[in-house]
Every structure is written in C-alpha cells, then in structure tokens.
Amino acid sequence: MSTLSKPWLSLLKPSTLALSLIITFTLGLAGCNNISPMTDSTPTKPPASNTNQPPQGIVAQCPTFDPEKTMCTAQYDPVCVKTQVGSVISYQTAGNACSACSTPEAISYVKGECL
C-alpha cells in the first residue's frame, strides 16, 4: 500500500502531531480566557421564621401528603403554614403552598409570610 492511499498516516508524523497539539493547547487556553465567571442563579430563600401568629387571610387546608404523588416547583410565593407536632402548634413561613404541605405535620396555610 502506498502512502497516498492512506493520507491520515501523514498526521502521525512527529512534526505534524506536535504542531496539532500546540495549536489545540493554544486555542484551548485562549478560549478559557473569554469565559466569564458564572454567577449563582439559584433563588435565595429567606430564613424560615417560626412564630406564633399567622397573617390575616383565607385559611387553606393541606391535603393528605403523599410523597409519591407530589412534586413541588421552586417558585417563591410565600405562605404561612400551621404545623402540629403532638399538642404543640406552630407557624412557619414556607416558599409556596406545595412545599408548605409537603410534611405530614402541616395542617393548613395562609397566603403571605408569617408575622
């Protein structure tokens, strides 16, 4: 077989291979120079508040929580959720109604942050 029938063999010459590596490395470094640092785009959640007072508004009852049938979105539409553990009732701000009712302790919620 002649060298002409396999032109890819010329790529294996040391000089061609070295030049290819130098060009690839140089372009790789130059490309990295133009990349701006990524900013964290995840929404920040305010710290959860645990108070004894819900805001005024219409009270919505939480449905029975079934983790296999529930999938909450990450939208922020704050609600004040009423939870009960034993005989202790407390109120806590949650990111949205779905996440508020995603615990078995949740009883109901009111639109808006807890006071």
Image (spheres, rainbow, N blue to C red):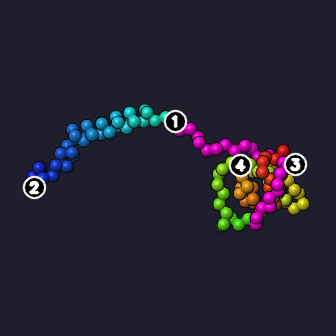
Mark 1, other Cα within 10 Å: few <14 / some 14–19 / many ≥20: few
Q: In terms of sequence position, does the residue under pointer 4 or pointer 1 come before the other?
A: 1
Residue at the spot of label 3: 53
Where in the figure is residue 51, as x and y percent of width and height? Answer: 85, 47
User: Mark 4 belongs to which amino acid?
Assistant: Asp
Residue at screen point 25% across, 37% down? 19
Quarter-of-image position of residue 44? top right
User: Mark 3 belongs to which amino acid?
Assistant: Gln
Where in the figure is residue 45, as x and y percent of width and height? Answer: 69, 44
Q: In terms of sequence position, does the residue under pointer 3 or pointer 2 come before the other?
A: 2
Q: Residue 101 shows which numbered tag?
A: none
Mark 3, other Cα within 10 Å: few <14 / some 14–19 / many ≥20: few
Q: Nearer the viewer, residue 79 or 92?
A: 79
Left or right, residue 46 beside residue 13: right
Q: CA distance from mark 3 to mark 4?
A: 19 Å
Residue at the spot of label 4: 77
Residue at the spot of label 2: 1
Q: CA distance from mark 3 to mark 1?
A: 43 Å
Q: Main secondary structure of the magenta part?
A: loop
Where in the figure is residue 79, as x and y percent of width and height? Answer: 76, 51
Residue at screen point 46% across, 35% down? 35
